[in-house]
Image (tube, helix red, strand yellow):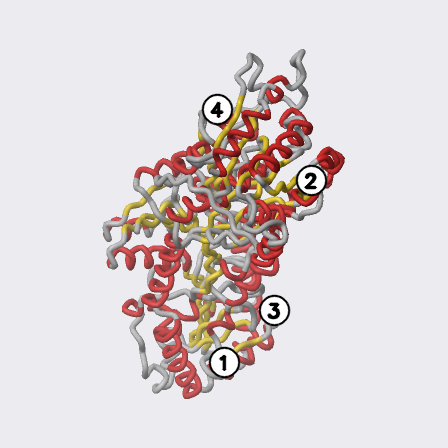
Amino acid sequence: MRIVQMVPALSLGGVETGTVDLAKALKTRGHHPYVISSGGTLVAELVKAGIGHLQLPVHRKSLASLALIKPIADFLERERIDILHARSRVPAWLGYLATRRTNCDFVTTCHGYYAKHFLSRVMGWGKRVIVISHSIGRRMIDDFGVRPERITLIHRGIDLSGYPFSPDKYDRPPSGKLTVIHVGRISPIKGHHDFLKAVHLLSRRLPNLQAWIVGAPDEGKGSYFRNLTSMAESLGLGSGVQFLGMRRDVPELIRRADLLVLPSRIPEAFGRVLIEAGAVGTAVCASRIGGILDVIDEGENGLLFAPENFEDMALVMERLLLDRPKCKALAHALRKKVEQEFNLDQMVNRTCRVYEEVRREKKILITKLGALGDLVLAVPSFRMVRHRFPEARMSLLVEAKLLPVIQRCPYLDDFICVNRSRGRRMAVELARVAKQIQRAGFDLSIDLQNNWRSYLVAFLGRIPRRYGYRRGLLGSLLTHPVLEWNRDLAPVEHQFQVLKRAGVLRYDDTMELWSEPDQDRASAEILRNPSFASPPRPVVGLVLNSSPRWPTKQWPVERFSELARRLVKELDCTIVLLGTGGGQPLAQTFDGVAREYVVNLVGKTTLTQLTSSIKHLDALVTGDSAPLHIASAFGTKIVALFGPTEPRRHMPPGASHIALVKRIPCQPCYRGRCVNHETLKCLRDISVEEVFRAVARQLA
């Protein structure tokens, strides 16, 4: 794999050292690691190891840093990077936005106890969010809304070859000074004030005590450092406290010390210095807070004290400094735990496992919010996507009322339902759905709806790769748009243009649909009832109100009535009347047809009952409507009557379908209201004789 880690800088520090250690380990395992940072003293180690480094000012907390997104994205594309692993907030924002332009996956590691504000939330937006302690994991779940399944706990690890263990250091009495060491950046949260007070208190009882403070102040924290030195002088500590600054020999300094103290005031993310002390065999004590508790088991491998309580700290320090056998026992126990749980190989193995899972796992959202017929026509696309991504977890964003029709589809794993409405309620619903999509963590979306709603929810759901036809202003929210809208393509072929953009290359427009077994049995009893005739008569369905919102799609009902009489008289057919509740008055036109030959289901079926009824027909006569596509999916013979719409664009796949259309000058018009001086001429020109012959041909 080709992996980029991003950190603000590569100066000396726990996060930076861990970044370099991981990069080196990845290279030895045959991967191709890179690091992006603003530079620093550790860059030389990367260069020496033959690891690529891109120097950019990714540490700057400024809107001007957004200009770095393009060069980062270009680098990811040029080097064909698989994973971008961000370890801090500013690099995470830049990396997150850059990966939206590429096929690179985004991973984060949370190294800090981040303040709860929007700019910190990006650390929870990785496809996987690595946390270095249980307390950080809890923080990301409770305060940043990261789903537990997206979080992976990987403790920090160190290369033990760089930390020689001193098993017998406490077997000898101290020679000269008793040394306590504090390692960490010079910052108020590291508890330096409390540490100095504890040293001052303890120095009265242990006159041979000295303290080393290792670390440099954060940028802009120079006044805090000066305040510390002044405090040491005012307490009369003098040479008893040494400020050693930033050092490269930290393991050796810790090894020489008698005790390491970590007096953090706020929860530590982890406390790498504790495992460094354990590795070299130095006893430790620390604040009872945060990720420290992942390392220290109190009384077994170290001692803990109350945070911000210098008196408690002094008592614990004194107890250890005066009990060298206790120090030895704790140090040996901590070394054993470091070997078992905090070694570099274990950290690298778990991190590589995360990388592999991220590359292997795909979560795909397909959006189809249209009408019933459009949903049925999308089934071949579901199958084609499944064939291309057999191990992916595929979810469908669908209108809630249509779910019963599609929920048995074997190509889909999950469904996200939308209750479509107008006005303010619609905005609330879209926000709810976007939040649900965001929490699910999809890798890509395939938009088969292509309207402003579908564009918006995928964007707000933070799906990194969004495929679809670009239409209107919000079409610019797609990351991988299809620009050409070919109106001459058949419906499934039209969808396939989007699928090709997403990497689907195998075309298959076979229609499918799955009915409810209970509904199938009920429909068979109604439509295939032996009491109708023996042997059974052919069963022909007539859809009276093809599309209530498009009266221009409806063949005149008197024509349907005349057709029914001829089918009964000449072909001995059973007639099934289908349609919505609004078509009930139309069904009264069939009172002249022998009652025993007519089954009136207009307005009497649910969607699942409708699909099962169409499944049991021998033939269906319909306009351009949902029953047309349902019949195609079940292999029911079709005679389709097209008026204002174009058969090439809307006829479902199938070799035996018959489409009747009259090519008059205004056809196709795609209007819901006819403007021809001869109202509905395109449909009225389709004669009963033509339709009768077409049905007879289908039944034959």
Q: Which amino acid, mark 4?
A: Arg
Q: Position of residue 438 (x, y in %)?
A: 56, 48
* Residue topped by disc 4: 487
Q: In terms of depth relative to the viewer, which is nearer, 556 or 260?
A: 556
Front position among marks 3 and 2: 2
Residue indicated by mark 1 = 206
Query: What type is the residue that disc 3 sits on?
Result: Glu
Instruction: Tell which circle, 1 or 2, labels the residue nearer the N-terminal end.
Output: 1
Image height check: is 456 above or below 6? above
Q: CA distance from mark 1 to mark 2?
A: 113 Å
Q: Is tag 3's residue or tag 4's residue first in the polypeptide sequence?
A: 3
The residue that label 3 is drawn on is 308
- Please say if the residues under marks 3 and 4 sit with CB atoms less than 8 Å apart: no
Q: Is residue 27 above or below residue 581?
A: below
Disc 2: which residue: 594
Q: CA distance from mark 4 to mark 2?
A: 44 Å
Task: Indicate the secondary structure of the residue bearing disc 1.
Answer: loop
Please tell me whether mark 3 or mark 4 is closer to you in this view: 4
Mark nearer the viewer, 1 or 2: 2
